[in-house]
Amino acid sequence: MNGIVFCDMPAFVNTSRSQQLQQLMQRGSSGSSEQYHRLFAMGVDAYQLTHQLRNMQSGAQYEGVTGNLSLNNNYINRRLAWAKMSDGAPTPVN
């Protein structure tokens, strides 16, 4: 699978946001299954958006764990991170 390029949530592409999500998950629950990590990430961003919405109305972006979030015509847009498989693990692509 090495060499495959794909997009995913930044929290799952070995970035600083993946470390942030892991810390939040360890603090928030004990022994949670990996099948819920993506749902947990969406919940984190949904909560953070309540505090960021006013800034986003003036054009600011929020770098969430699910992607870079922006507001456009009252819709939340999400930009995912690009990654490339290298040695069996996703590596961020700039």
Image (cartoon, rainbow, N blue to C red):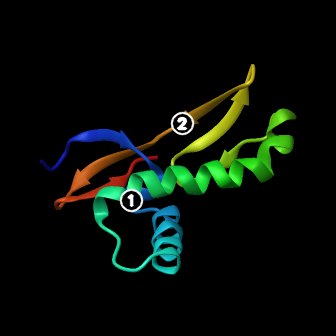
Callout 2 amino acid: Arg
Decide: few, some or many residues near mark 1? Use Cα within 10 Å; few <14, some 14-19, many ≥20.
Answer: some
Q: Closer to the camera, 33 or 6?
A: 33
The residue tagged 2 is 79
CA–CA distance in space, label 1 to label 2: 19 Å
Q: Residue at x 30, y 67 (%)?
A: 33
Query: For this view, does 53 lie left or right of residue 1?
Result: right
Q: Residue at x 72, y 31 (%)?
A: 71
Query: For this view, does 49 lie left or right of residue 6?
Result: right
Query: Hey, which quadrant is residue 89 in on the image?
Result: bottom left
Q: Is residue 22 above or below residue 82?
A: below
The residue tagged 1 is 37
Q: Which mark is residue 58?
A: none
**Residue 36: percent from left, percent from top:** 36, 57
Secondary structure under badge 1? helix
Secondary structure under badge 2? strand
